[in-house]
Amino acid sequence: MVTSGTEDSTGGRFEEFGRRVDQKVGTAIPRAQDELKKIIAYLNDDVVPHLRQDSSKALRAVASQLEKLAAHLDDSRQGGDL
């Protein structure tokens, strides 16, 4: 059985530990939020525009290939190859 003196000292150490953890978490959260804002800004300002630009280039390339395929199908149909 634990005596009340030991219980108090253990409980006191646990409470002190809890206070230190709360303090560290309390200072870490605003820093984490600031870093998250920086990440979001980077994605919005640098990554997304490049993705959009690259996506439009890819769509143009696909459109060109589809046009060639359509022309080939038209030529084949007119020549009776199908």
Image (cartoon, grey):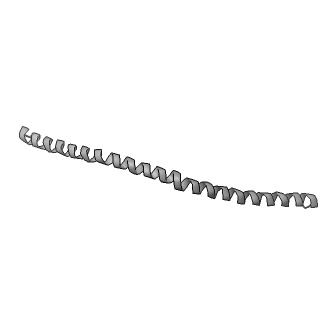
Viewer-side residue, 64 vs 38: 38
Residue found at x 74% / y 56%: 63
Residue 1 as seen in the image, left or right of residue 49: left
Residue 72 as seen in the image, left or right of residue 41: right
Point out residue 8 in the picture as x, y percentages from the top left corner: 10, 39
Residue 64, placed above or below residue 23: below
Q: Quadrant of the C terminus?
A: bottom right
Residue 18, placed above or below residue 71: above
Residue 82 as seen in the image, left or right of residue 20: right
Query: Seen from this angle, which residue lies furthest top?
Result: 4
Residue 76 as seen in the image, left or right of residue 27: right
Residue 4, placed above or below residue 49: above
Residue found at x 58% / y 57%: 50
Point out residue 43 in the picture as x, y percentages from the top left corner: 50, 53
Point out residue 40 in the picture as x, y percentages from the top left corner: 47, 50
Point out residue 37 in the picture as x, y percentages from the top left corner: 43, 48
Res. 21 visible in picture = yes
Res. 82 visible in picture = no
Viewer-side residue, 70 vs 39: 39
Residue found at x 45% / y 52%: 39
Q: Quadrant of the N terminus?
A: top left
| Numbered label tally | 0
